[in-house]
Image: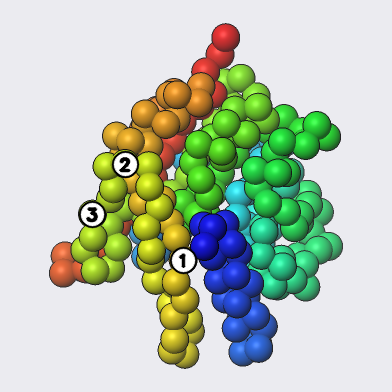
């Protein structure tokens, strides 16, 4: 089955699971590029006041709302899952500076009406989308010199290392209260991510591997900071 279909169905079920449970997450006080509340936050995005941002895979909308309210940014929050989008609109539809968009990120970026962005970012959403298509679309919409910052899975909870080829693999998406869903993710080595970014017209400024606080936990994320190359 097509990767996009697999992921679309999984995230629709994930969002519906939390709608059925009535899950209400607390407001965030900072961005968390990993899973542990440690490491850098919004400061890696630079000064956000008056900047136009794109959130790729914005989920429940907590991060776009935080960046608009606490940092004065204007954020287009793009989420493909109808149920995750519903969770976001139920809570943040009235937040000034946030536009919640239900759309496939690549299709949204390829629209002629899509604006240019000072900063595009993604917290864990980047790895669910074909990077060739997504980076090509982003290169058209991030302004020259603008930033692209995203975090992706590096090593999963079973200790599986990142891939050395641009190929998606099956990963597990756990459900609160028990159960799990299967998704397909591009879990790539930092070097391969850098190659893809350069090919698409971006220059990498910094790559960091964010690891779990407990040494016994192999789960890790890669945080990548890049900017669009000037002509």
Mark 1 sits on what residue?
183
Mark 2 sits on what residue?
165
Query: 42 left or right of 63?
Result: left
Closest to the camera, between mark 3 and mark 1, is: 1
| Label 1: how many Cα within 10 Å (few below 14, some 14–19, many 20+) | many
Q: Please tell me in which quadrant of the rendered image residue 184 appears.
A: bottom left
Query: Which mark is on residue 163?
Result: none
Query: 35 left or right of 129?
Result: left
Query: 100 left or right of 195?
Result: right
Q: Estimate the x, y position of residue 150 in percent, counting from the top left.
A: 48, 45
Q: Is residue 39 visible?
A: no
Q: In the rendered image of this protein, does residue 146 appear above or below residue 165?
A: above
Q: Is residue 201 visible?
A: yes
Say which element carries label 3.
Answer: loop
As drawn, the residue found furthest toward the left would be: 216
Closest to the camera, between mark 2 and mark 3, is: 2
Q: Estimate the x, y position of residue 153 in percent, counting from the top left.
A: 37, 55
- Residue at position x 65%, y 80% in the image: 16
- Residue at position x 75%, y 58% in the image: 102
Q: Earlier in the sequence, mark 3 or mark 1?
A: 3
As drawn, the residue found furthest toward the front would be: 1
Query: Which mark is on residue 161?
Result: 3
* Tally of marks: 3
| Label 2: how many Cα within 10 Å (few below 14, some 14–19, many 20+) | few
User: How far apart, in angstroms, are the residues tagged by discs 3 and 1?
Assistant: 17 Å
User: How far apart, in angstroms, are the residues tagged by discs 2 and 3?
Assistant: 12 Å
Q: In the rendered image of this protein, does residue 118 appear above or below residue 180?
A: above
Q: Please tell me in which quadrant of the rendered image residue 137 appears.
A: top right
Q: Are marks 3 and 1 in contact (CB under 8 Å)?
A: no
Q: Nearer the viewer, residue 72 or 190?
A: 190
Q: Estimate the x, y position of residue 210 in percent, counting from the top left.
A: 31, 52
């Amino acid at each position: 089955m097509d990767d996009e279909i697999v992921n679309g169905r999984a995230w629709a079920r994930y969002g519906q699971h939390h709608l059925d449970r009535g899950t209400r997450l607390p407001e965030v006080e900072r961005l968390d590029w990993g899973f542990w509340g440690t490491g850098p936050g919004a400061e890696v995005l630079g000064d956000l006041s008056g900047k136009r941002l794109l959130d790729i895979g914005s989920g429940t909308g907590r991060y776009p709302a935080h960046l608009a309210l606490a940092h004065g940014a204007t954020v287009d929050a793009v989420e493909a899952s109808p149920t995750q989008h519903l969770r976001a609109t139920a809570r943040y539809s009235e937040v000034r500076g946030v536009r919640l968009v239900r759309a496939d990120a690549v299709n949204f970026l390829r629209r002629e009406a899509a604006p240019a962005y000072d900063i595009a970012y993604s917290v864990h959403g980047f790895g669910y989308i074909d990077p060739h298509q997504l980076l090509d679309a982003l290169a058209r919409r991030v302004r020259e010199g603008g930033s692209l910052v995203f975090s992706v899975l590096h090593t999963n909870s079973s200790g599986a290392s990142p891939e050395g080829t641009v190929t998606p693999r099956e990963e597990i998406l756990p459900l609160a209260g028990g159960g799990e869903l299967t998704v397909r993710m591009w879990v790539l080595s930092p070097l391969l991510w850098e190659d893809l970014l350069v090919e698409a017209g971006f220059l990498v400024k910094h790559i960091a591997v964010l690891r779990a606080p407990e040494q016994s936990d192999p789960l890790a994320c890669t945080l990548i900071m890049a900017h669009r190359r000037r002509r």
